[in-house]
């Protein structure tokens, strides 16, 4: 491996171990339990939109585990969105019926959005739209781990993808942090809506706008599940769109025009940093102007996103 550090004039070469001394089998057996996987899938459903062009890849311990996660993920997404196409979440493993056809569909078609696998998709599969990686297993090989990460490293200009996200329910990245050659760019983004809007308005080019546009859409997507009914109504009154439709429309804007499109909603987005997500709606909510969301159940502070 070659390492370039700030201030150095030349690369330094060093070797990392391929097999890492991590207790894997016993740990992985502990995560094949219904309660754990149900909780993980319910949380993932708050962050993953099955109608988005972004693809999600979930790594499981074994084939039976993959079956359970497919079932639980479908249930969680239905609870979250109300409706779900049966083909939105599929298992793609060696035990699947016609796995190569499933991989082709995952790569080229809108559905499936979520693929659940074990090892089949760790190498040799090029799906640039994979934006979310979910680890529900650990591995003891640095090479295998980096191959798993590599499924999401392709840029996809068609959907505005310039980065990818890791959802690590088992500490797989933490276990490999000392040996992986692929460190994270951001570990816990805590930027406020106000700062994202301001950065988007000041972005120097379309590439920067596209990245901020994706981050802003993801932040709203994560937060919308915590809107109270009053908050949803106020958000729609202020923007003209329900939160889900707003996220879809935001993602569909061209980076060159996204600032203009977003302008009418800037004030309400900034107020997302000041409201609440829980509690009863105020009695006078219907008398408020559409821009006054602070008492309508919207989230408080950057930690809410």
Image (cartoon, grey):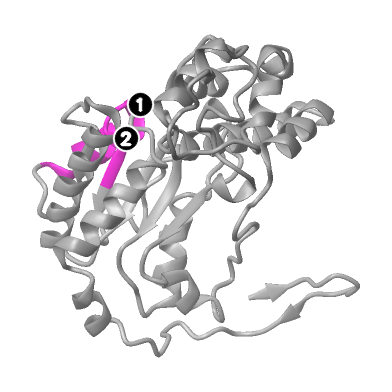
Position of residue 271 measured from the top left corner of the image (x, y, whole percent): 66, 30
**Residue, disc 2:** 113
Residue ID at (23%, 42%): 76
Task: Give the quadrant of the N terminus.
Answer: bottom right
Q: Is residue 36 left or right of residue 71?
A: right
Outermost residue toward the bottom?
21
Disc 1 element: loop
Find the magenta span and give its range.
98-115
Q: Is residue 261 left or right of residue 65?
A: right
Disc 2 element: loop
Q: Is residue 81 above or below residue 13?
A: above
Position of residue 234 measured from the top left corner of the image (x, y, whole percent): 52, 18
Image quadrant in which you'd find residue 199 = top right
Q: Dot 2, crowdedness within 10 Å: few (<14), some or many (≥20)?
A: many
Q: Which mark is residue 51?
A: 1
Is any atom of residue 100 visible in this view? no
Task: Mark 2 and mark 1 in contact? Answer it, CB < 8 Å.
Answer: yes
């Amino acid at each position: 491996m070659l390492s370039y550090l700030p201030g150095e004039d030349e690369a330094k070469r060093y070797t990392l171990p391929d097999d890492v001394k991590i207790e894997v089998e016993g740990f992985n057996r502990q995560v094949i339990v219904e309660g754990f996987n149900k909780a993980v899938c319910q949380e993932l459903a708050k962050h993953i939109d099955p109608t988005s062009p972004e693809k999600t890849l979930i790594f499981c311990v074994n084939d039976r585990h993959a079956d359970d996660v497919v079932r639980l993920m479908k249930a969680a997404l239905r609870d979250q969105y109300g409706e779900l196409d049966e083909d939105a979440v599929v298992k793609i493993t060696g035990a699947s019926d016609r796995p190569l056809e499933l991989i082709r569909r995952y790569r080229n078609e809108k559905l499936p959005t979520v693929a659940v696998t074990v090892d089949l998709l760790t190498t040799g599969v090029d799906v640039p739209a994979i934006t979310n990686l979910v680890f529900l297993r650990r591995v003891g090989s640095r090479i295998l781990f980096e191959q798993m990460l590599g499924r999401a490293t392709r840029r996809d200009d068609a959907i505005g993808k310039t980065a990818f996200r890791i959802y690590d329910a088992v500490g797989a990245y933490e276990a490999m942090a000392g040996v992986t050659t692929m460190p994270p760019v951001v570990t816990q983004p805590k930027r406020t809506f106000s700062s994202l809007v301001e950065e988007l308005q000041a972005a120097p080019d379309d590439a920067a706008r596209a990245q901020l546009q994706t981050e802003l859409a993801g932040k709203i997507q994560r937060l919308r599940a915590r809107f109270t009914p009053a908050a949803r109504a106020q958000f729609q009154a202020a923007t003209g769109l329900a939160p889900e439709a707003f996220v879809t429309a935001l993602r569909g804007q061209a980076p060159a025009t996204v600032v203009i499109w977003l302008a009418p909603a800037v004030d309400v987005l900034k107020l997302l940093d000041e409201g609440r997500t829980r509690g009863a709606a105020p009695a006078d909510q219907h008398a408020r102007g559409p821009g006054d969301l602070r008492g309508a159940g919207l989230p408080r502070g950057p930690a809410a996103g």
